[in-house]
Image: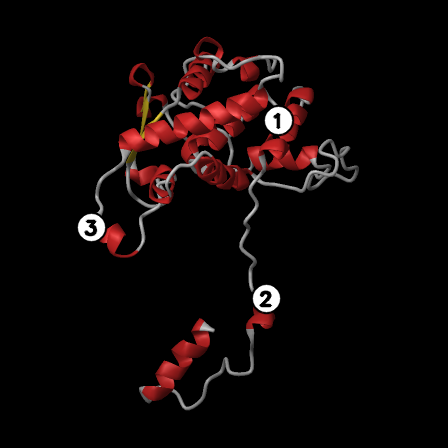
Amino acid sequence: MYLKQLFNHGIKLGFLTYNPASAFNVNDAGGVEKSRDRALSVEELRFAFEVFRENRTSFTRDNYLACALLVVLGVRKTELTEATWSEFDLNNAKWNLPGERSKSGVGMAIPLPPQAVEWLEELHIRACGSPYVFPSRRSSKQPHMGKDTLNRAIAKLFGKEPGKKQQPENRMGDLPEFTVHDLRRTCRSLLAETGVPSHVAERCLNHKLKGVEGVYDRYDYYEERKRALIKVANLFNSVMLPSSCTPCAANAGCALLNHTK
């Protein structure tokens, strides 16, 4: 479509006499790409993380905690998996995401719920002195977790392992497939479910506000985002806890800590 417009503009300016793209349509380019809108429900989250725990030999502790942080914080995958400890101030429960590592190009101070701080403290021990929150666990040119690590680990639980003649067993049963990015979308859904106003939820995901509001509203909503992410973390924690266990401040991350280290 855009090439047709470009060539038509060239005809108007007298640079071309015909449009070489006129015979083609969007199907010739593979069709229209469907945007994903998958967000996991609370029950789907509970089931998925139960499967993660049951398959701890293949779905590592690093993978598990990364997925938990993605649900609770709503950040983009590489913003988390390529993060360095220098960005974190765990004493003040804050993550200073620099603009050069943000897709939007805008840096952001991310408030960390108590559960996230607890998981990050464990990851700091597991990092064994690495400057990266998720250091590479294999010989690799990359010093941090690879871009495909989480998606491949999740896909394997769905019985899909590219390049393998014999495919693994589907451990997820009838659960509709999801990807790592769907966990970020799930965070947005949980924000709405817990009653967080839309403009605060959008700022939690580091989305720019649209229209006139986006032009004039420069407030970062830090305290509002802090309360919002705590709501999501508490809801997520209640999903992870056994029904007989009541969440409390002292055991904020106990459900995840039950996943063998």
Residue picked out by circle 3: 216
Judging by the rendered image, the residue that carries numbered circle 1 is: 49
Give the Cα distance between marks 1 and 2. Answer: 35 Å
The residue sitting at 57% across, 20% down in the picture is 61
Total numbered labels placed on residues in the image: 3
**Could you tell whether 71 is left or right of 99 in the image?**
right
**Mark 2 and mark 3: Cα distance apart in space:** 38 Å
Res. 134 in view: no
Residue 131: x %, y % from top left: 38, 21
**Cβ atoms at labels 3 and 1 below 8 Å apart:** no
* Mark 3: secondary structure: helix
* Amino acid type assigned to the residue bearing label 2 in the image: Gly
Q: Which residue is mark 2?
A: 31
Q: Residues within 10 Å of mark 3 (few under 14, many from 20)?
A: few
Q: Amino acid at mark 1?
A: Phe
Q: Residue 98 vs residue 169: left or right?
A: left
First reached walking from the N terminus: tag 1 or tag 2: 2
Q: Is residue 215 visible?
A: yes
Mark 3 or mark 1: name the one nearer the start of the chain. Answer: 1
